[in-house]
Amino acid sequence: MLMYGKTMFMVEIARAFRPEASLWSTQGVFEGTVTYAAGLSTSGGLTVWLRDIVGRDFEALIDEAAQTPPGADGLVVLPFFGVARSPIFDAQARGAIFGLTLSHGRGHLYRAVLEGSAYEVRHNLEVMTAAGALPEQLSAVGGGTKSGLWTQVVSDVTGLRQVIPAVTIGASFGDAMLAGGGSGLVAADVRWNAPAETLVPDENARGRYDELYRVYRSLYPATVEQAHALALVSEETAAAGRAAAGRS
C-alpha cells in the first residue's frame, strides 16, 4: 500500500521476517504474515509549499508539470524538507533542488517535486525487497491519487503497476472490513473495496528515470555534511529567536 497525503506511507506484507533497521516492522494482521512500513515526512506537504510560493492553484501546476518531460529537464529534488524518515532516518537532513537553470519554470519545479517523492518511494521499496518483501504492485490510496500525474510518475519511476480502489480516503473503511472479518460478519473473500483504475508504467520514461534515480541516490551522501552544517545554523537561529522572545 502507498498512501499519498501530506506525508507518504508504505506498508508491505511479507511471509517471512528479516530484521531491517531501515524500516518499521510488526506482526501482520493475518496469520503467518509480517508487515514492513516506511514513509516520507514531506510529499503532499511539499506540493502545498510550492503552490503557496508560486501563487498558482494545483490544477494549473499539474497542467504545466504534465507538459514537462520526464526528468523535468534535468531537475532532481531531495524531498527532505521536514526530516528524512526511512530508510535514512536523519533529522538533520535538508531538502534541495539540484540542476536549476534560468530555463526552468513552475512546471519543471512541480514535476521535480513529484519525481523526488517517487525516487524516495523507490528507495524504500528497494530496501523492502532486500528485506524479503517483494512488491509486485502498489495499492494507491489518499488524496494525492486524484491528480493522476503524481500516481503515474510513481509507477514510471518504480516500474510497478498501481491499483487505485473505489474508496481511497479513510482508514476507518479498512478498520470496518477487519472488524467485520474478525467477527465473522464479513466473508474473508469479500470484495470490500473494488479496484476502480489500474495504472501501468510508461516504458518510454523508464530509461530517463533510471538515469536520474542514480543521480538522486548519490546526492544525499554527497551533501550530508553540508546539510548538517545548515541544520545547525537553522537550529542556532531558532534558539536565538526563542531567547529573544523570552526576554521581551
Image (tube, rainbow, N blue to C red):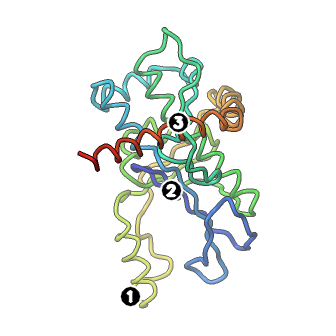
- The amino acid type, in three-letter code, at marker 1 is Leu
Residue 103 coordinates in the image, percent (x, y): 49, 9
Q: In front here: 202 or 29?
A: 29
Q: In front here: 161 or 43?
A: 43
**Which mark is on residue 185?**
1
Q: Is residue 45 above or below residue 13?
A: above
- The amino acid type, in three-letter code, at marker 3 is Gly
Q: Quadrant of residue 195?
A: bottom left
- Decide: few, some or many residues near mark 3? Use Cα within 10 Å; few <14, some 14-19, many ≥20: some
Q: Which residue is mark 3?
A: 95
Of badges 2 and 3, the one in the foreground is 3
Asked if the residues shown at circle 2 and circle 3 are in contact, with their CB atoms under 8 angstroms apart, the answer is no
- Decide: few, some or many residues near mark 1? Use Cα within 10 Å; few <14, some 14-19, many ≥20: few
Measure the alpha-carbon separation of dots 2 and 3: 18 Å
Farthest residue to the front: give it. 247
**Which mark is on residue 17?**
none
Q: Is residue 30 above or below residue 5?
A: below
Q: Residue at x 62, y 84 (%)?
A: 31
Q: Which residue is mark 2?
A: 9
- The amino acid type, in three-letter code, at marker 2 is Phe
Residue 81 coordinates in the image, percent (x, y): 48, 40
Q: Quadrant of residue 11?
A: bottom right
* Quadrant housing the C terminus: top left
Residue 182 coordinates in the image, percent (x, y): 46, 87
Question: How many numbered discs sit on the rendered protein?
Answer: 3
- Decide: few, some or many residues near mark 2? Use Cα within 10 Å; few <14, some 14-19, many ≥20: many
Left-right relation of 80 to 180: right
Asked if the residues shown at circle 3 and circle 1 are in contact, with their CB atoms under 8 angstroms apart, the answer is no
